[in-house]
Amino acid sequence: MHDHDHLEQRLSQHRTQAPEGFADRVMESLPTWRKSERRGWWPAHGRWVAPALAGAAAMFFIMLAVPPLHSSEQAGEVVFHFELHAPGADKVELLGTFNNWKSGDIVLQGPDASGHWTASVELPEGRHEYIFLVDGDRWVTDPKGATHRPDGFGQVNTVIKVYDEDNA
Amino acid sequence: MQDRASTMDGRTDRQLVEVCLAGNRDAFAELVRRHQDSVFGLAVGMTRNREDAADMAQEAFIRAYGKLEQYNPGYAFKPWVLRICANQTKNLFRKRTRRRKAEEDHLKEEAVLADAADNDFHALEKALSNLPPKLCAPLRLKFIEGLAYDEIGAILGIGISAAKMRVSRGKQRLAEVLNNA
Amino acid sequence: MHRAIALALLFCGAVPADQVEHSSQNWKQLRGKNLEMGISGERVDRVVAECRKAGLTVAEAEELFCPVYAAHDEQLPTECLFLKIEEGLAKGVDWKDVHKATDRRLECLRQADGLVMAVRSGRGGQHQHLVMHVCMAMESGLSADVFAKLFSRPGGFRYGRLIHVVEAGESLKLEGLTDSQVLHVMNDCLDRNLTGAEVFRMVDVFQEGFKQGKDYDTIHATLWVSPSSTSSDR
C-alpha cells in the first residue's frame, strides 16, 4: 500500500505542463481592447478592505470577484427532456436515482394545450432510473421509455443511459 | 526567453495586473506563463482530455483578461483564475458535442503516452487521469497547487467539508490505482 | 439493547460482530452512523424522518440500514443500496419489503464484486463502477454465469468499454432475451470493440425490432451486416 505521506509529497512535486506555445496562443486570442467599466460596489482605487476580513466574509469577497456559480457541480452533465401525457392531472412529479427519489424536487410544468407535462433536467452522465408521481398518489411508468425495469416493489421504473453525444 | 516559473520577472501578480490594467498587454502574458500549468492541470483534471483542457485553459485566461478589473488584488491571482477555469469548464465543456473519443479512451482506460517511458511523472499523470473529475480536480488543487480547503471549495463551488471529503477519497483512490499499476 | 442486537443478528447475516455490537441506541446515533458512511446530512435526515413518519423504531431502522453498513465494511459501493432504501420509502413500501429488496441488491453486489475480483488484481480504477453495473444487470435477471464467462474471455477487457456492454446486456435481458443470447451479443460488441454510442445503437436496433414483432434471430442476423456498424479497425 502506498504511503499516503509519500503520495502527498509526489503530488506536491508534480506538474502537468501546459502545451508548448500555450501562452502565445492565449495572447493571440485576446481582444485588442478591454472594457474598463467597473462594478458599482468595487472600489476604484486604493485600499482593498477584503484583506482585513477573515472567514466567511473573506470568502464572500472571493466569490464576488468571479462569475456566479451554476447549479451543476461537475462537468459531464447532460440535459434530458422528460415528458408525460396526463391531461387530467393536477401535479406531475419526477422521482429517480438522480434526485434520490425525492418527492417535490422536480415538478413538471404543464399541462399544455395537448395535456403534456414536461421538464428538462441536467443529469450526470451514466445510468438512471425514474418514475412519475401523478397527483401525489399514482405511480406512472414513462410509456415512452425504451427500457422498463420492475422495481421490486410492484412498480416499473424506466432506465435511461445518459452520455454526452460523443462521450459514450 | 522567460521560463514557465517566471523567475526572471520579479513583479508580483498584483503588480502585473495593475500594469495590465494600465494598458500593457505583455504583463498579462507573464501572468499566463506563471499560471498556465496550474490552470491547464485543473482543466485536465476536469476534462480528462488534453486537447479539451488546453481549450478550456485558454478560454479561462481570455475571460480573466476581460474581467481583470474584478480581480481583487488582496487575494492571490492563481485561485481567482482557477475559479474562472472551473466554472466555465463545467459550463462550456458539457455543451461540447464533439469530443476526441480516441484520446478520451486513452486517458480513461490506459493513458498510453506517445513516448511512454514509464517514469515517475508519467505513472502519476496516468494514475491521476484514472480518477473521476470530481475527485481529481480537488486532489490536484490541494497537493499540486497547494491550496487551502476554503480556496478549493470556492474554486469548485463546493463546501469545505465536501472539498475535504473529495480530497481524502481522491487520495485513497489514487493510492489504489498506483498500487494496481 | 439485547433485543436490538438479536434482531440485527437475525437480519444482517454477514455483518461483522463489531458492527452489530455498536447498534444505535437512538436516532442521533443512527444518523451519525450513516453520516460516517459518507451519505450527505440532507439525505440521511430525510430518510430518518421517513422512517420515523412510518412508525419505525430505532432498531427497525437500524435493520433497514444494515445492508449499507455491511457494504461499507466490505468495501462495496454503498450508494446504490442507500438509493434503494430511499426509493422504497418514497414509494410508501413497508420497511420489511424495502429491507428485502436492499438485501437482494447487496447480494448482487457481493456476487458482482467477486466476479470482477476473480479477474482483476485489485479494486483500482473503475472497479466500483463496473461492480455497480454488473449488480444492476444481475438484479435485472442476468445470471452470475454470464459474467463469469464474459470476464474470462481471451484478451481481457477495458473498464470503459465493458461498462457500456454490461449496460446493454441489462437492457437486452429486460427485453426478454435469454442469458445465452445476451452473452452472445455482449461478446459481439467486445469482439468488434464498439464504442459506447455504437453499443447503445445496437440496443436500439433490438428494441425497435422487437416492437416490430421480429424475433432475436431475425434481428441478430442483420445486426453486423452493415459496414458502418463495425469498428474492427480500431
Image (cartoon, helix red, strand yellow):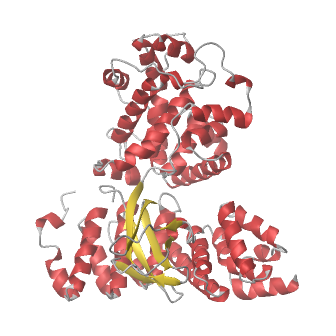
Quarter of the image where the N terminus of chain C is located: bottom right
Up-down relation of residue B136 to residue B24 (above or below): below
Horizontal and vertical percent position of residue A167: 33, 55
Front in this rendered view, residue C104 or A93: A93
Q: Quadrant of residue B73?
A: top right
Q: Is residue C46 left or right of residue A118?
A: right
Q: Residue furthest left?
A: C226
* Residue A29 seen in the current view: yes
Horizontal and vertical percent position of residue B59: 38, 33
Residue at (65, 40) in percent of width and height: B149
Residue at (60, 47) in percent of width and height: B158
Front in this rendered view, residue A73 or C69: A73
Up-down relation of residue C196 to residue A43 (above or below): below
Q: Residue furthest front?
A: A113
Horizontal and vertical percent position of residue C160: 38, 61
Q: Is residue B119 left or right of residue A53?
A: left
Q: How many discs appear?
A: 0
Up-down relation of residue A36 to residue A167 (above or below): above
Up-down relation of residue C218 to residue A132 (above or below): below
* Residue B116 seen in the current view: no
Residue at (53, 26) in percent of width and height: A39
Quarter of the image where the C terminus of chain C is located: bottom left
Q: Quadrant of residue C53?
A: bottom right
Q: Residue furthest right?
A: C1
Horizontal and vertical percent position of residue A9: 61, 36
